[in-house]
Image (cartoon, helix red, strand yellow):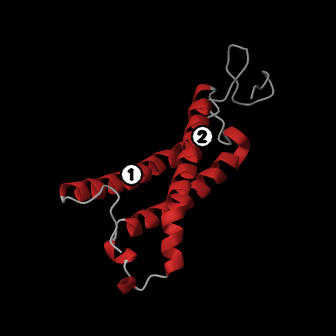
Amino acid sequence: MRVACGASRDEPTGGGVWEPPMDLAGPMRGGAILLALVDTVLLAVIGVFAWWREDPVFWQNSGGWPVGLRAFVRVGFLPLLILHLGLLLWLTWLGLRSLLRRGVSLLLLGALPPLWVGTLAVVAWLLVNNVLNLLEGRPFHWHPG
């Protein structure tokens, strides 16, 4: 956003054109923030699914979990994870692009680190649990039941 001299009270004293240091509306004027909120909810669902996937009691009938929920977690986890990673990469690209164009969205840049930390935590949980399966002599994606 450019403001001609004389149109703003905080204009520079030497003449010229004054440019604000950042635009708080940022990319897409809130659309990216809405997508970041959707991705946060999606990450929470993926986190719960990851916990259930690696919990042996979840896959047994003794746990009381409905068979339909178990089937949904088994089939839906990977597509939801891929959707989340796609959204996260796109939001990261929007954030980096806004930094380069000086149209910084502080809300978007503030939302990205927790999303990345949460994603890395989910992936680490899955990897550690599956590596433990290998160390105990079971298949990589072993689940009882």
Residue at x 67% of width, y 20% of height: 12
Element on which disc 1 rests: helix
Task: From the viewer's perspective, tell me whether residue 116 is left or right of residue 28.
Answer: left
Is residue 106 at least partly visible in the picture?
Answer: no
Element on which disc 2 rests: helix
Say which quadrant the C terminus sits in: bottom left
Q: Earlier in the sequence, mark 2 or mark 1?
A: 2
Dot 2, crowdedness within 10 Å: few (<14), some or many (≥20)? some
Dot 1, crowdedness within 10 Å: few (<14), some or many (≥20)? some
Task: From the viewer's perspective, tell me whether residue 82 is left or right of residue 114.
Answer: right
The answer to which image quadrant residue 143 occupies is bottom left
Q: Are marks 2 and 1 in contact (CB under 8 Å)?
A: no
Residue 44 picture location, percent across and down: 49, 63
Reading the image, the residue beneath label 1 is 123
Reading the image, the residue beneath label 2 is 90
Say which quadrant the N terminus sits in: top right
- Could you say which is closer to the camera, residue 60 or residue 20? 60
Is residue 117 at least partly visible in the picture?
Answer: yes
The answer to which image quadrant residue 100 occupies is top right
Disc 2 marks a residue whose amino acid type is Trp
Residue at x 57% of width, y 54% of height: 39
Residue 72 picture location, percent across and down: 54, 69
Residue 81 picture location, percent across and down: 51, 53
Vertical position of residue 81 compared to residue 94: above or below: below
What's the CA distance linking mark 2 and mark 1?
19 Å
Considering every residue shown, the one lying at the far left of the view is: 136
Residue at x 40% of width, y 55% of height: 122
